[in-house]
Image (cartoon, helix red, strand yellow):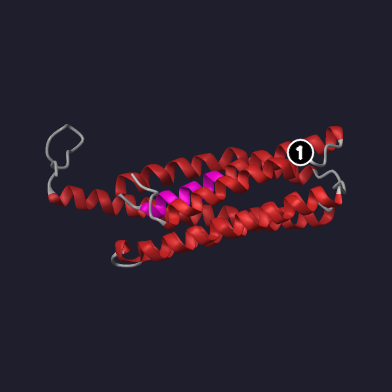
Amino acid sequence: MPAARDGRGGAASVGQVGERRRVLARRVRWLVAGTIAYNVVEAVVALAAGEAAGSGALVGFGLDSVVEVASAAAVAWQFAGVDPERRERAALRVIAGSFFVLAAYVVGDAVWALARGSEAGHSTVGIVLAAVSLAVMPVLSGAQRRAGRELGSASAVADSKQTLLCTYLSGVLLAGLLLNTLFGWYWADPVVALVIAAVAVREGREAWRGEHCC
């Protein structure tokens, strides 16, 4: 195994490597905390707006935020321990399960939306929320993925992909709400949501097998 290198290209000492790992673990904890806080707010707003507008897409997006909180909480629990690596397998199982739950709900909601053919009302709050999430989530996901890969943490990388999936769902939600508002295309959101569900299943399988790393 090659020696670790410092910032000037020289061999890093064991102490430097240990300190870098502590910095990365602390960074992951802060990013996870930020993700949890944002998703709690997102869930409350999306569920309230979805109920008001009769939008299954918005309600589904709010429930996705709840799933994202569960995934991030699993990583937070892992890194709260003295030896995070010992807890990684359990954290990965929780993350994988959250992907599967999300996929199951999105498929069920999309099929039901297509079957009933009912149109949701316009939601300015939902459109703004989806646009903000589309901007915020890639930043959180990218930062956590970089830290997780350098740290060698499969669970941190897997959770970052859960956050990235939330970005895709934000885009789908935004497109669906706009197409429904502008053209009355109620079917646009559930059709694209089925594609997102397929991606969620794939990511869940990779997390379950521990393939989300470096």
Q: Can residue 139 be seen in this snapshot?
A: yes
Asked if residue 142 is positioned above or below residue 26 in the image, the reply reads above
Which residue is rendered at x = 87% and y = 46% of the image? 119
- Give the percent coordinates (x, y) of residue 202: 51, 48
Which residue is rendered at x = 72% and y = 36% of the image? 175
Callout 1 secondary element: helix
- Would you identify the image quadrant in which residue 132 lies? top right
Instruction: Please name the residue that numbered disc 1 is placed on.
Output: 188
Magenta span main SS? helix
- Give the percent coordinates (x, y) of residue 29: 41, 56
Label 1: how many Cα within 10 Å (few below 14, some 14–19, many 20+): some
Residue 156 sits inside the magenta stretch: yes
Which residue is rendered at x = 44% and y = 51% of the image? 206
Residue 19 sits inside the magenta stretch: no
Which residue type does callout 1 highlight?
Ala
- Magenta region: which residues? 154-165
Position of residue 5 in the picture relative to residue 137 (left or right) = left
- Give the percent coordinates (x, y) of residue 187: 79, 41
Position of residue 88 in the picture relative to residue 195 (left or right) = left
**Observer-nearest of 112 and 182:** 112
Position of residue 89 in the picture relative to residue 48 (left or right) = left
